[in-house]
Image: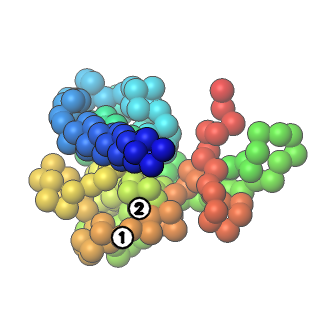
Amino acid sequence: MKNKNSVKIILIVVGCLFLIILVFILCTLDLNPNKEITGIENYNKNHYIEEYGGDLDSNLSIFPEDKNILVDPIFSSSFKTGLFDSDGYILLKTKYSEENFNREIERISKLEMTIKETCYPNSKNYTNYIKYDENAYKYPAYITIDGFGHTYEYALINKDDLEIVYVYLSYPSVNNSKYSDYLKKDKSEYSKTEVLSLYSMYNHTFDNGSSFVEFDDCKG
């Protein structure tokens, strides 16, 4: 009997080790290469919402809809889907006419998101508002996500040049030259581990941090 129990224990241990090794291999293998998109003619924020959906934790509301009013825009993105999540970036740098610049600032500054605790009628709800920060970045920034879930979404405002840089980052690297100029001044901010305590316009907790409800949890 003891021998049979010993064999079972050994088999269980070997099985567990095999699963651990398998997960490690899957996580380290480059099974999904980065999908890169460049050129303003390819700018379509709905593509990312449809393609990466739940991984974004955002509806990219800070990004503009109408690309026809953009002046000398530069657009690029890169995403990689991993075993449990997607990481990458979306960058749109553009100038505006003075009239359109002011309209866009007005649009951005009024962004908000109401989140319901449940999908039932008369559920509790909470409204988050976009944040404004003049110090964290090189330029003043309107921020919809500030580190929650290792994700960042913001617009940098260069009033002198009538220019706005729209940024979405998931698991950013401080050494990535594509967006290093648009990162926070204090790079230690990206090393935080308690990321669920950080800000997101798209999420809210109704139970003091035990769980979080996302803006689209009740959408079919």
Q: Position of residue 152 (x, y in %)?
A: 38, 55
Q: Amino acid at mark 2?
A: Gly
Residue 112 can be seen, yes or no: no
State whether residue 149 is above or below residue 85. below
In this view, the residue in front, 117 or 8, is 8
Q: Which residue is mark 2?
A: 147
Residue 185 can be seen, yes or no: yes
Query: SS class of the residue under badge 2?
Result: loop
Q: Are marks 2 and 1 in contact (CB under 8 Å)?
A: yes
User: Could you say which disc has been placed on residue 112 in the image?
Assistant: none
- Residue 71: image quadrant is top left
Q: Position of residue 26 (x, y in %)?
A: 26, 36
User: Could you say which disc has been placed on residue 192 in the image?
Assistant: 1
Q: Position of residue 67 (x, y in %)?
A: 35, 31
In this view, the residue in front, 148 or 65, is 148
Q: Amino acid at mark 1?
A: Lys
Question: How far separated are the C-alphas under marks 2 and 1?
Answer: 8 Å
In this view, the residue in front, 85 or 130, is 85
In this view, the residue in front, 208 or 88, is 208
